[in-house]
Amino acid sequence: MKVLTVLASGLLLLSACTSPVPQKVASESNQERDPSSIRNVRNFWESSSLSITLGSGTKIDQNYPVKFEHFTAYEEDKPVTRMVPVVEILWEVVRRPVLVCRSEEGRGSSPLWDAFYSARGSEKGKFLAKAIQGVGPVSASSLVEANYFDSKPRSWDDFRDEVERAAKAEVITKNVRHQILYQYRQENMTNLGYQTHISNACTYETESYLAPREVVVNRPRTTIETQTIRKLINTERANYRVKVSGQRLQSFETEVIVLNFDKESGQVGLSSTAYNNFSLSLNSNVITVTGTGRKNIKLPSAVLPRGGTLVKGNGKARFSAPINPTFIPKTTADGYLLGSIRITSCRIGTFGGCSLRNRDERTEPVVVKTLVPAQVVMTHEFEIQSGRRYWVNHWVNAASSPWYINNVVRSSSQPEI
């Protein structure tokens, strides 16, 4: 394919000598607003883009209105309240099996108790935290200061009553109480000498008690956020005469050109287009857009729909695959669409696939077919041998095309027998 020279693409900017630069407009004042919360005040013009759709034979010579809006904008810190998910603890009564030991068997004989009761007053909190799992150093110090555990509990029931008394007096929290008596129940029974290894002295019994459960709830949370405030100052309108011609498109293609207007600089920009390169000129309020050549467009993958088949019979195989007729050239001036077929075969193995030890893979020469407008299916027939497996790869490409470069589009399907 003959490669076209790219004369203009992307964003083209031209200045209009008659477009005045607007004066800055002061932002509105608000006596109730804290001036220290307002920053980056600015005024600017915002323009509407003009979009025009072209067909293969479209010529444009038409007037279009364009709206320009003048804004003032600033940043302001404002309190914003939003509902956010947070994890909370819900306390509820549960009935679960807990370890219970006969009090006469467990008397609280424990080195951890001994260390606590023999410790100096300043260190008692530290040793109590070591003795009781779940209490922690802060709660342990509070218990010592409030004169809890002045004497050693002689049974688990006595220990539990002391913990319950501290919880009721709010010396420890409900969570600490739960950890001591239930979460670390067996560890505390063992470490503090209230669990015995005598047979049948300890059993599991169902008990009702308060237990925590984590729940996710939505709560309002207020934060200070920076918001951009925009306010319209005024609106102006202008008429432009737009002329468009010279685009090269096929009958099924459309080109969209987008003109962008900048009020302050007086410039007009042309956004990038899909099929053609364009030049742009601006004279007063007349905009002329001229096609300067077609871009290097690849043949689309849509040329090959899925659905290739391969069937056998009477010692032959017949391959067929659909072709999208949209992309088949209508005349020789549109070039050619070539379909290529490659047949590969191998010896069949024990499990029906290609043999691993004696694969004997053979690839036949590529068959090229010129596809004509009436031909919407690419076909090929070839002889096959028994005891062999066959599969077909196929692809298409454009040749001598004024519309597409000579790229190859391969089918994603590979029919086999």
Image (cartoon, helix red, strand yellow):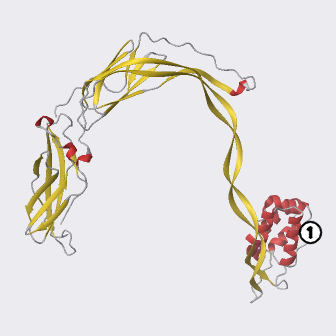
Q: Is residue 133 visible?
A: no
Up-down relation of residue 190 to residue 130 (above or below): below
Specify the quadrant that holds the C terminus.
bottom left
Residue at the location (83% across, 69% down)?
A: 115
Q: Position of residue 104 (x, y in %)?
A: 85, 85
Q: Secondary structure at mark 1?
A: loop
Hey, which quadrant is residue 211 in on the image? Answer: bottom right
Residue 138 picture location, percent across and down: 81, 58
Coordinates of residue 415 in the picture (x, y in percent): 20, 61
Where's the N terminus, which quadrant?
top left
The answer to whether 262 appears left or right of 4 in the picture is right
Q: Residue furthest front?
A: 62
Q: In the drawing, does residue 107 fall left or right of residue 324?
A: right
Q: Which residue is mark 1?
A: 150
Q: Which amino acid, mark 1?
A: Asp
Pick whichever, 205 or 6, lies toward us: 6
Q: Nearer the viewer, residue 78 or 245?
A: 245
Q: Residue at x 41, y 13 (%)?
A: 16
Would residue 274 be found to the left or right of residue 181 on screen?
left
Q: How many marks?
A: 1
Quadrant position of residue 155: bottom right
Image quadrant where residue 255 sits: top left
In this orientation, which residue lies closer to the viewer: 143 or 30?
Answer: 30
Percent coordinates x, y for residue 136 in the rendering = 78, 61
Examine the rendered structure and indicate whether residue 301 appears above or below residue 92. above
Instruction: Characterize the local packing of mark 1: few (<14), some (14-19) or many (20 or more) Cα atoms within 10 angstroms.
Output: few
Residue displayed at 78% across by 87% down: 201
Left/right of residue 287 with respect to residue 358 in the rendered view: right
